[in-house]
Amino acid sequence: MFLENSYEPKDTPVHKLNPLIKFLVFLSIIFLLFLRITLLTQLVLIGFVWVVVKYSDSQEFVTKQALPAYGFLICFLLTVNFFFMKSPGFWTSNVLSTYYDILGSKTYQKLEGDIVHHGWYWGGEILGGDSSVKLGDTAACIEREIGWNKMHDCGNHGAIKTALTAVTQSPKWRIMPINVGGQTKYVAFLPAWYTVSSFQIMNAFSLANKIILVIILSAIFTMTSPLTSFTYALEDLFRPLSILRLPTKLMALTVSIALRFVPSLITESFRIIRAQASRGIDYKNGRLTDKINALRSLFIPIFVISFIKSDELAAAMTARGYRPQENRTSFRAYKTENWELLVMGACMFVITILYYLFFNKYYLSSFGNAEMLISIAR
């Protein structure tokens, strides 16, 4: 990710921004993307990233590399979901009663019973039908409805383990757990080989959006931040740990040196591959086991080279008088200007609102079932 030759010196606001501010905003967005965020949050993040792309002059990277990668990701994830995610996506009305619509146009009241909703699908069958989905307290109840184990008592919670074992042995009906007011209940779906559902499509787009946003943000961070500024950001980030008497400067230096070695080791690995290929080792043809055995001969030289380079670096640092125990000054002081604080405040304000919407279960009903399929459905 952090390669030395990826930095592009330009005169843009993002390049001038304090590296610590860039790193904090970057981490805040990455942590948010790991959550099961709604479609509204994803659209806000896409707009935010587009503003960053514009003010970092990275449009060429997005159009030539990120967008083709995004198209490949969508096709790949749609293919994977077609084969392995045979479900229309289920959720219940009582679960919706714990969520809040931002526009307030649709509210759900907690009901005595529980109505199961599902997304659009083509091919397959839901136990109980589309309008009255059968909801079981345990997997044994669903097994009994299907007819696998008619002797099972639906009230016997100890039968769940046996029931789930039977589920794994059946290639047809799929029993799926869903969340009902903090409790786990079960529904069943009989997929066809050609089953296509909105649950598959929306999850593919959601995951592709998250992956491509991580790629774009990582690329922009490396293209606008030299390695020295990244080391400075790490030192400032680790500074609170100095209260615990931890060597924060050494920790930051270790991380930055490790990242500096990545492009060098990649270059050396390509040289070794070409040298060994000239000696008759084939990395491209043959069976998978043959390719793995060929790669084994690559690990030992890389391991040796990494030790040699680390010794050379240690000798060079010692020759230049580097002493990790002493307080060191910096050639360049990264001062924080007022406009940088304003940018950080605006970014953190938007990110804080997005975290608030996630943890307080807000969604936008204008998107219909799309929000449910991404953030609630199982």
Image (cartoon, helix red, strand yellow):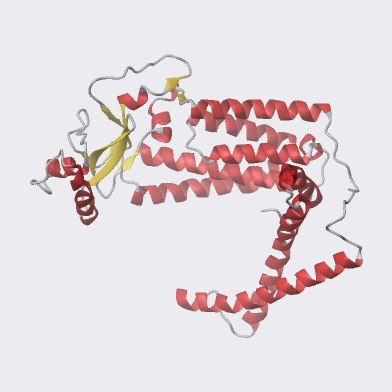
Question: How far across and down, in percent of the image, does residue 352 sit?
Answer: 60, 28
Residue closer to the observer: 288 or 284: 288
Question: Farthest top residue?
Answer: 105
Residue closer to the observer: 348 or 56: 348
Q: Is residue 120 visible?
A: no
In the drawing, does residue 63 fall left or right of residue 190?
right
The residue under the point 56% across, 49% down is 69
Residue closer to the observer: 4 or 95: 95
Question: How far across and down, in percent of the image, does residue 104 sit?
Answer: 44, 14
Question: How far across and down, in percent of the image, does residue 282 sit?
Answer: 56, 79
Answer with the quarter of the image where residue 32 lies: top right
Answer with the quarter of the image where residue 170 lies: bottom left
Question: Farthest left residue?
Answer: 151
**On screen, 256 above or below 241?**
below
Residue closer to the observer: 336 or 206: 336
Question: Farthest bottom residue?
Answer: 279
In the drawing, does residue 259 fall left or right of residue 126?
right
Question: How far across and down, in percent of the image, does residue 339 sit?
Answer: 80, 27
The residue under the point 50% across, 29% down is 358
Q: Is residue 202 visible?
A: yes
Q: How many marks?
A: 0
In the drawing, does residue 11 fall left or right of residue 180?
right
